[in-house]
Amino acid sequence: MPVKLALVFSGVHKRGGVERSIWEAARHWRHQHDVTIVAADVDPTDLDGVAIRQVPAADGSGPYRFGKAARRLYRLDEFDHVISFGVQPVPATIAWVGSVHLAWLEASRRFPGQSKLRHPMLRYLLRRHLERLYLERQYFRAPGRALVVTVADAVGADLTRLYGVDPGLLATINNGFDPAEFDPSRREREFADARAEWGLPADAVVLCMIANELPRKGYDLALRAIAAAGDPRLHLVLAGTADPARYRALVAELGLTGRTHYLGQQADVGRVHAASDAFILPTKYEAFCMAIVEALASGLPVLTTSVPGAGDLVQPDVNGLLLDDPEDVDALTVLVRRIADDDVRAGLAAAARPSVDQLTWAKLFDRAITLFPEPSSIRR
């Protein structure tokens, strides 16, 4: 039976993780349901039939400003379900949670180098973290939620442990991929053109990283391991919003000038995959990494860490390689040398796409809609 859905978040587009998942949800659900987006930054491409209530751009920066403006654009009783993505002060019947900031702060205590502060516990006192943690407490402890969707079981466990969220309200829907954009045959078709577009040598072994946050994702570790591997064919391609300018001195020191490439933010990540041979992400923390799902879907072997949320989909020596210690550059160097081997890489690539066939957006969102409670059962 069709239902009326409102999807609420500051951004709905293909240039980010949460933003991409909402854009995909609206694109899929619009065929059977009445879908409205409440957002500040919306890419309307392929969203015909979806109503858009746009928050003024000036009010879209920051969760508090966005929440205040968004609340003026809708009422709970207009819809069967209002789904809030991310952590923001808006009324909603369903919370869709991609990560828990307090869980990341806990994990970061294992990595003193992650912060310039003398002691990692001092990070809790920084204003940006205090504000985010206050918002999380208010959001996750708010009454009236009929369902809390998380991208991984571990995220749900964190919500129960850290904020007392009722386990009975939790359901897991992983991040997914669009099979039209991420496909091994596309990589084969576009390989030469994509390499030429970005000036990448045809015979290079290109490792790509898709990341909007470089210290946590281990960009510096990747640079050091590639340099230490001693293979001049190795190149590193970075796409995302995080400008790696701060690493220029390190790149020069390591002798990687000309072998690192920053593409900026890319709406078509599948095109980046077409120019690449493997995906690298020596990350310190993830909830359920969409970039890894998409890389595997494109048939790229994945070299990442065994931390939950990153290594969940990677089967060592089957579809990728796993690093146990996210700060062990020597161990990562060994793995980089292995993935630079053409025969090793070909074997891993063959198993990459089949390992995520169950994670197309269509399959995930079809399942999600069956988990939504009956609108008549929701207290508003």
Image (spheres, rainbow, N blue to C red):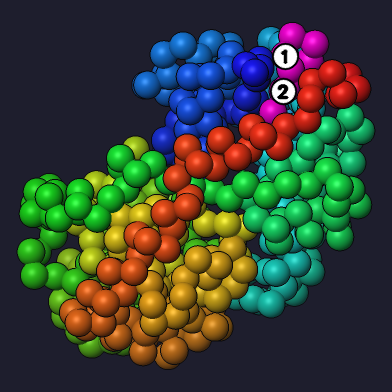
Relative side of 78 to 284, left or right: right
Question: Residue 311, how many percent across, how many down?
Answer: 53, 70
Q: Check the picture and name the quadrant holding the N terminus.
A: top right
Question: Residue 284, how many percent across, how many down?
Answer: 57, 70
- Mark 2 crowdedness (10 Å alpha carbons): few <14, some 14-19, many ≥20: many
Give the magenta-colored segment's residue range: 76-83
Q: Residue furthest front?
A: 1
Q: Quadrant of residue 291?
A: bottom left
Q: Check the picture and name the quadrant holding the C terminus.
A: top right
Q: Quadrant of residue 2?
A: top right
What is the spatial separation of the Cα atoms under label 2 and label 1, in whole angstroms? 6 Å
Element type at mark 1: loop
Disc number placed over residue 82 in the picture, else none: 2
Disc number placed over residue 79 in the picture, else none: 1
Q: Which residue type does callout 2 highlight?
A: Val
Asked whether residue 174 appears in the rendered view, the answer is yes
Foreground of the two, 125 or 4: 4
